[in-house]
Image (tube, rainbow, N blue to C red):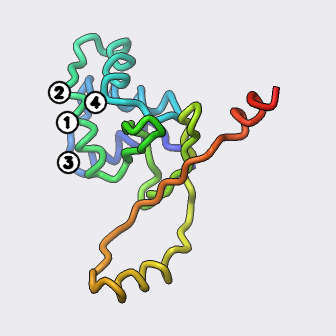
Amino acid sequence: MTTSFETLAQQFRAQGHKLTQPRRAILRTLLATPKPLSPAEIQERGQKLYGDLGLVTVYRTLELMETMGVLRAVHVADGCHGYALATPGHTHHVVCERCHDVVEIVGCDLGHFLDRVAETTGYTITGHWLEISGICPACQRQQAR
């Protein structure tokens, strides 16, 4: 499912948030790439759309978008993390170790496993997050050459 600017704009408004020019620049920046971006990369690219975009604004907007469920932190092979847009309700990703491309995995078959975790630990499971690393098809082809 592809997320559009208008869909994200509606989500902001529906949850009572203003869609300021800096937020518009951040949304458009995130929509322009399938790869997770660091806050500094988002600021750098976003400044091409809104020259006064500050790093503090980027961090605050990313935090807001995570709370809204439209953004996910994605850990990449270098030990850092970036941010990518997410389909609401889905927190599973496959991340390429080389190019850092991210693909969301739709659907979840972890129900029985999570039930066992709750049973053996005594925890009430309130959510989960799954990230798988590997080498994407494009990087595999490049490696084969």
Q: Position of residue 126 (x, y in %)?
A: 30, 73
Residue occupied by mark 1: 60
Instruction: Mark 4 or mark 3: name the one nearer the start of the chain.
Output: 3
Q: Earlier in the sequence, mark 1 or mark 4?
A: 4
| Residue linked to disc 3 | 16
How far apart marks 2 and 3 lie (CA) works out to: 21 Å
Question: Measured from the top left, where is residue 107 in percent x and y?
Answer: 56, 66
Residue visible at 53% across and 69% down? 108
Please name which of the two marks, 2 or 3, marks the residue nearer to the observer.
Answer: 2
Depth check, front residue: 144 or 8: 144
Residue identifier under label 2 = 56
Amino acid under disc 1 = Arg
Eyeballing the image, is 129 above or below 93? below
Q: Residue at x 34, y 68 (%)?
A: 127
Q: CA distance from mark 4 to mark 2?
A: 12 Å
User: How much space separates mark 1 and mark 4, taking CA atoms?
Assistant: 10 Å
Question: Percent position (x, y) of residue 6?
Answer: 42, 38
Label 1 to label 3: alpha-carbon separation: 16 Å
